[in-house]
Amino acid sequence: MTNYASSKEKPANRSPMKQQEKIDAYLMGQLPKAESTAFREALQSDKALAQEVEIRRNMLLAVRQVGRDELRNTLNQIHQEVKPQPDAQPIKNNRIRQLLPWLSTAAAAAVLIFFFVRYQATNTTNNIYQQLYQENYQAYELSLNLRDVPPESQSSNALAWYRQGDYTDALSAFQALATAEPQQTQYQMALAICYIELGRGAEAKNILQKIYDAKDPFLSDEAAWYLGLIALSEEQSPEVERFLRPLAEDSRADHHQSASNLLKTLSEH
């Protein structure tokens, strides 16, 4: 297990790309549990690392809005361009060496702004699917009965992280809770939303489909709604129709009006 907090490696000697991949894996909930815990502990003592993670977290959130693949390739290209080449002359000025990672971040931010402006200019005319997704998606309002539960319990922490938008830590906590109490569908729903927020749609669909197929009396409509939204983000019209049409036709269903309005707008384009 990597002990980030006690590592003696200096920031200047870290491989920028390797560090970036580690941060991305942490933010997307893809690190092994022990390694994720060590990384989270390191954030408490390493302010530079914490700041780097926060910058990358904001970038990844924006990536989902401005075209994941195109922007990610551009950002990675920038990191490749600023990475020292094997035959390059070493930079002796420590001040310049310390500024290199921030120059990379500044360049990446400039590209991010460019893509965001371009996205804003073209979104309303070129991609009704993504526009409707952005207008209709909101994270599920999670409600857990925490009466008589200690404030520092795993469920309390999981709910707090979820409500704060810290879906990386919430994911780890809800995975443990769902394993301990598989019958608790609120935990399953929370997991699905964490996966959506972290850009892991396939895993979210897998959980939501199980809730939907089980005809859960409290969460079946919610599962259908989010399955429809995922299909919308993937521009899969038949799947959008499959999950949202029953909600639109049932006046008692959750999200009835929203599903009806969304399908109506979609049919007009």
Image (spheres, grey):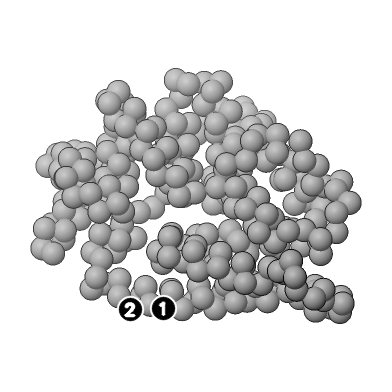
Q: Quadrant of residue 53?
A: bottom right
* Mark 1 and mark 2: Cα distance apart in space: 6 Å
Q: Quadrant of residue 173?
A: top right
- x 29%, y 30%: residue: 212
Q: Is residue 204 above or below residue 74?
A: above
- x 55%, y 31%: residue: 175
Q: Quadrant of the C terminus?
A: bottom left
Q: Position of residue 265 (x, y in %)?
A: 16, 61
Q: Amino acid at mark 2?
A: Ala
Residue 158 visible in the displayed image: no
Tell me whether the residue at label 1 lies in contact with that at label 2, contact meaning CB atoms closer than 8 angstroms: yes
Q: Nearer the viewer, residue 155 or 37?
A: 37
- In the displayed structure, does residue 226 sit left or right of residue 245? right
Q: Position of residue 136 (x, y in %)?
A: 31, 56
Q: Is residue 3 above or below residue 267?
A: above
- In the displayed structure, does residue 60 sit left or right of residue 223? right
Q: Regarding mark 2 in the picture, which secondary structure is present there?
A: helix
- In the displayed structure, does residue 148 sit left or right of residue 252? right
Q: Quadrant of the N terminus?
A: top right
Q: Position of residue 118 (x, y in %)?
A: 38, 77
In the image, which disc is placed on residue 121? 2
Mark 2 Cα within 10 Å, few/some/many (few <14, many 20+)? few
- According to the picture, the residue beneath numbered tag 1 turns out to be 117
Q: Nearer the viewer, residue 156 or 101?
A: 101
